[in-house]
Amino acid sequence: MLVTRRKRRERTAINIYLNIKPLEQVKSIKYLGIAIDNKMNFREHIISTTKKCTTLIHTLAKSAKLNWGLKQEALNTIYKGAILPLILYGAPVWIMAMEKNCNRTLYSRVQRHINIKIAKAYRTTSNDALCILTGNAPVELKAEEAANLYRITKDKQNQQLDHETDPQDWTHPADTVRICEQNELREHAIHLYTDGSKTEH
């Protein structure tokens, strides 16, 4: 595979022989589960991942009807445990591809399909409303989060990372908020005179 981003027309066919046999030249290869094309835009990887996730969602759709089948909690678990890791695999490598609107649209479409099943909503419901109803962040934000998390852990920076915690693990507001009482009789440089209807002094 010849990797180049040059836009000018040039001879791209390369004759390489191994053991007197010509090697086949391809436009994309798959390495560690990530499809890398000769333009390094990872479009083929996003398309193949979208097809896998769509097939999985259509299989789940047979058992996730409106009044029977898998419940919302089960579908949400399947999304977070199977579909989302499949989408986010190798995110630090192809995160720059999410800058293009066409790639974001493909992943948002996949998330929209599963969110409709989770929320038992109409097909005309907007994607933003579905994310709020299901409690799932948009997939482009999850991809950016995965890439940033990898970058931070790779650089071994001493930063505190935010993690999702259950409500029973939240700190009580009485333990974190400090209430300070102020004396109203302190001397100030500015004196205000009122009719005294709003204060006891």
Image: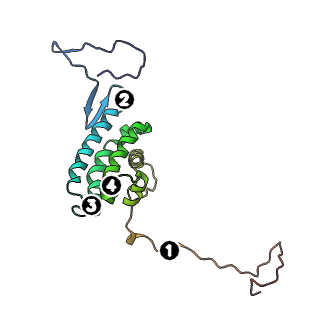
Q: CA distance from mark 4 to mark 3?
A: 10 Å
Please state the horizontal and vertical placement of residue 52, each as a whole percent of the image. Answer: 24, 42
Can you identify the residue that label 1 sits on? 173
Q: CA distance from mark 1 to mark 4?
A: 36 Å
**1 or 4: tag closer to the N-terminus:** 4
- Callout 1 secondary element: helix
Say which residue appears at 33% left-offset and 54% top-offset: 115
Towards the viewer: 138 or 165:
138
**2 or 1: tag closer to the N-terminus:** 2
**3 or 1: tag closer to the N-terminus:** 3
Q: Quadrant of residue 23?
A: top left
Q: Amino acid at mark 2?
A: Met
Can you identify the residue that label 4 sits on? 116
The quadrant of the picture occupied by the N terminus is top left
Label 3 Cα crowd, 10 Å radius (few <14 / some 14-19 / many 20+): few
Towards the viewer: 64 or 188:
64
Q: Amino acid at mark 3?
A: Leu
**4 or 3: tag closer to the N-terminus:** 3
The quadrant of the picture occupied by the C terminus is bottom right
Can you identify the residue that label 3 sits on? 66
**4 or 2: tag closer to the N-terminus:** 2
- Callout 4 secondary element: helix
Q: Establish if 39 lies above or below 59.
A: above
Say which residue appears at 79% left-offset and 84% top-offset: 196
Q: Amino acid at mark 4?
A: Ile
Label 1 Cα crowd, 10 Å radius (few <14 / some 14-19 / many 20+): few
Q: Nearer the viewer, mark 3 or mark 1?
A: 3
